[in-house]
Image (spheres, rainbow, N blue to C red):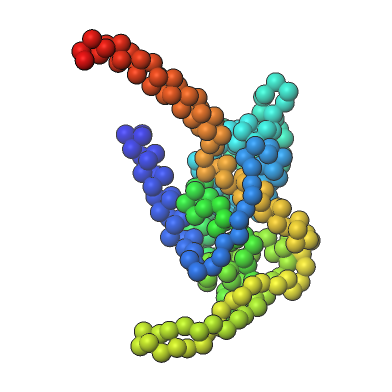
Amino acid sequence: MKVIKACLGVFIAVTLIGSVFASNGSVHLEKVNNSLCDKASLQRGAALYMNYCAGCHSLQFVRYKDMAKDIGIVDKNGNVLEKLVNDNLNFTSDKANDPIVVATPKTLSSKWFGVPPPDLSLVARSRGKDWLYSYLKGFYEDPKRPWGVNNIVFPDVGMPHILLALQGTQVPVYKTITVQDEQGKYLEKQVISHLELKTPGTLSPEAYDKAMVDLVNFLDYVGEPHKLERKRLGVWVLLFLVVFTLFAYLLKREYWKDVH
């Protein structure tokens, strides 16, 4: 029963994330070059997430202590530095063994944003790293929207640009393209070509891009904490299968040599 509930929870989370983070398939996604082996990047990404995202978005499938151990917040003996975690990453009353959840009631978040902000444990897996990276860089000024911003990857986004102070304000640059309507008529349409920085933030564009790589790297880890271990084990499994196949073939040839 517990296994069924856990699987059902994962399915619901993926479905919710997929519905809330609908993307525009016509938008070119920027390639992100992250590395799960880079512990410093994972730590910087965790700090960014906890300071800017965790107030609304939970990571309910990850516990503080497991996260800290995986990203290298440990002493020389491999023990988690719980005080360091609680002082810098845990801004709630939760314990180190608790999952990462938000303190904001869903009733309030629903009132502010229209829907409760989704859990982001699986967003990197459900939407993809490149989509997430492009989304984090894709906010631009739009006075027509309730929060004054829109997103080139997720049109009519329902959340504010929480990283505005870091990135600064971007404005869209349009281009005219020709499209064909349902009646076969050709029409000219304006679409966004790219975004330009209008007001600089506290980070330079290069520093902001690097920060978003760190944040995506952390969410990539959260989506599958044991990815590196799985890949390491996969190599040994494949080697075992190769050796086993060789011995199985030799055994088969020995058994069948007198039949022919």
Q: Residue at x 38, y 47 (%)?
A: 11
The outermost residue toward the front is 260
Q: Nearer the viewer, residue 225 or 69?
A: 225
Q: Position of residue 137 (x, y in %)?
A: 64, 62
Q: Report whether 119 appears left or right of 216.
A: left
The outermost residue toward the left is 259
Numbered marks: total = 0
Q: Position of residue 9 (x, y in %)?
A: 40, 44
Q: Position of residue 113 (x, y in %)?
A: 53, 65
Residue 222, relative to residue 183: is it above or below? above
Residue 198, relative to residue 98: is it above or below? below
Q: Residue at x 70, y 20 (%)?
A: 77
The quarter of the rendered structure image containing the C terminus is: top left
Q: Nearer the viewer, residue 256 or 187?
A: 256
Residue 43 seen anywhere in this rendered image of the structure: no
Q: Position of residue 109 (x, y in %)?
A: 53, 60
